[in-house]
Image: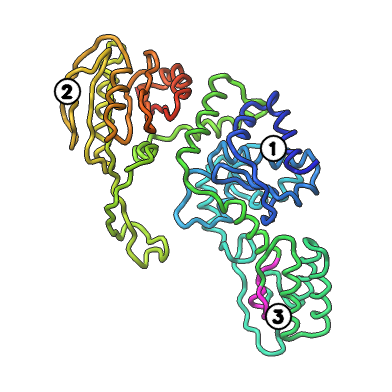
Amino acid sequence: MNALDRIKKISERWFLTEPLLFAVYCSHEFVENSAIEVPMRTGNMKIEFAPKILDKIADDVLVEYLKIEMFRILLKHPYQRQPSFAAKALLTMASNITIADVYDVSREVKKQMSGTEQKLPGGLCFEEYYNLLLQNTTPNSGKSGGEPQKTDSGPGQGDKSGQGGDDSGNGNQEGGESGQQGGDGSGADSGDASGDSRGNGSGSKGNSRGSSGRDGGGSGGKGSGASGNSGAGNSQEHRDSQISELWEDNEEACCNINEFIEVATASNNWGTVAGKLQGLIKASLKVDMDYRKMLSLFKTSVISSRRRLTRMRPNRRSGFDAMGSRYELSTNLLIAVDVSGSVTDKSLQFFFSVINRLFKYGVEKLDVLQFDAQIQGEIEPLKKARKTVKIMGRGGTSFQPAADYYCEHPEYDGLIYFTDGYAPPPVFNTKRPIDVLWVICSRQCYAENAEWIRKMKRNRVTFIPRSE
């Protein structure tokens, strides 16, 4: 049975025993990648796995690795809150520590989760652990948690040049031993032979060859002990970087994951996910609505072509040495506000407060219509925030008039409903792609109406957290 078949067999058991993990499993594509030197990694809505590594581990260990990736996804580590210019290895370590703090990882797997051996305070979040690691660790040091010692290597002193990073020249022998642990031993043989017989430049060469024999994929140098500063520590850093290599902000993925969490919360069906881990997963939902991300759901014309240079943002290529770019958000949206009798005055006040705040995030123009059982009054274009808005209607509710107006006007990039969600689903009679976002007025209304909204193609639903 190959690695993918073993993974599928695990998922079949999860279908009955782990509904939340099974839902996450089904949301990602499994892709074989023989180039990576870690069992599996997540990113871009896929889970890559190394078949040669998985073939060597037992089924119970494979289950544990798979669970760890599911927990990363549920905590949204691969898809949100990515620091600018983040050290990838430290991201992985922070994720490992966060998970190990609330989940009883098996001893065999925990040994492979770098960072978990560090004595850091418990109960912190992913970002806090990352910042602690960033303060205490130099990412390219060759050892997690310390800087390499820099020593000059003159002629005849090649054996001493790598002392700071596990490549000391006794170092050639140590590099060879490291190769023996992870590789087939050939690196170790060459490292020992050259290290014992020569203490100069050729010894450094032996060290470099020993480093290349490691299974960790460390990038040792090819000619000097100094450039061979890629011992076991640096090899582990390389593997950690591979795990988080695909991580980047993805609002769509976060929305999908949140839906799984909400279903598990509503049904109280978490499988074997323990209470502490449940609490951490639930806490990942409690993020205030980001209106820029809300607009990013609309795929067309969201970001305008107007580019402004600013010193407040780093340049992607050269950091703060050059001015960064700022793209103003600009989109053509139709806002449909439910003014039926079931929507309270307080909710309406809140809806229009949210609409006014959209202008603070670069939206230049909005067309606002009010509806109950029909469209009330004229469509009102807004180019700036309004202090007062006249509310009309307050009758029954039908979403269809707003849907019809949106379908008849292709100039709109998207439609946003502000509503409590209580009415029959609308039908969008158009052949063009639609983008519809439903913003529900409360968590309770959201829980009762989100399911039927999600069943409609290209319709998304959210609610805005607010204090009552």
Q: CA distance from mark 3 to mark 1?
A: 42 Å
Q: Using the image, determine if residue 252 lies above or below residue 224.
A: above
Few, some or many residues within 10 Å of mark 2 (<14, 14–19, 20+): few
Mark 2 or 1, closer to the camera: 2
Q: Amino acid at mark 3?
A: Lys
Q: Amino acid at mark 2?
A: Glu
Residue 71 visible to an observer of this rendering: yes
Kindly identify which residue carries mark 2.
378
**Magenta region, mostly helix, strand or loop?**
loop
Kindly identify which residue carries mark 1.
104
Kindly identify which residue carries mark 3.
160
Marks 3 & 1, CB-CB < 8 Å contact = no
In percent of the image, x 41 and y 60: which residue is there? 316
In percent of the image, x 68 and y 26: which residue is there? 15
Q: Quadrant of residue 339?
A: top left
In percent of the image, x 50 and y 35: which residue is there? 284
Secondary-structure class at tag 2: strand
Which residues are the magenta region?
Answer: 221-231
Mark 3 or 2, closer to the camera: 2
Question: On the rendered image, what quadrant is the C terminus found in?
Answer: top left
Q: Using the image, determine if residue 140 lies above or below residue 132.
A: below
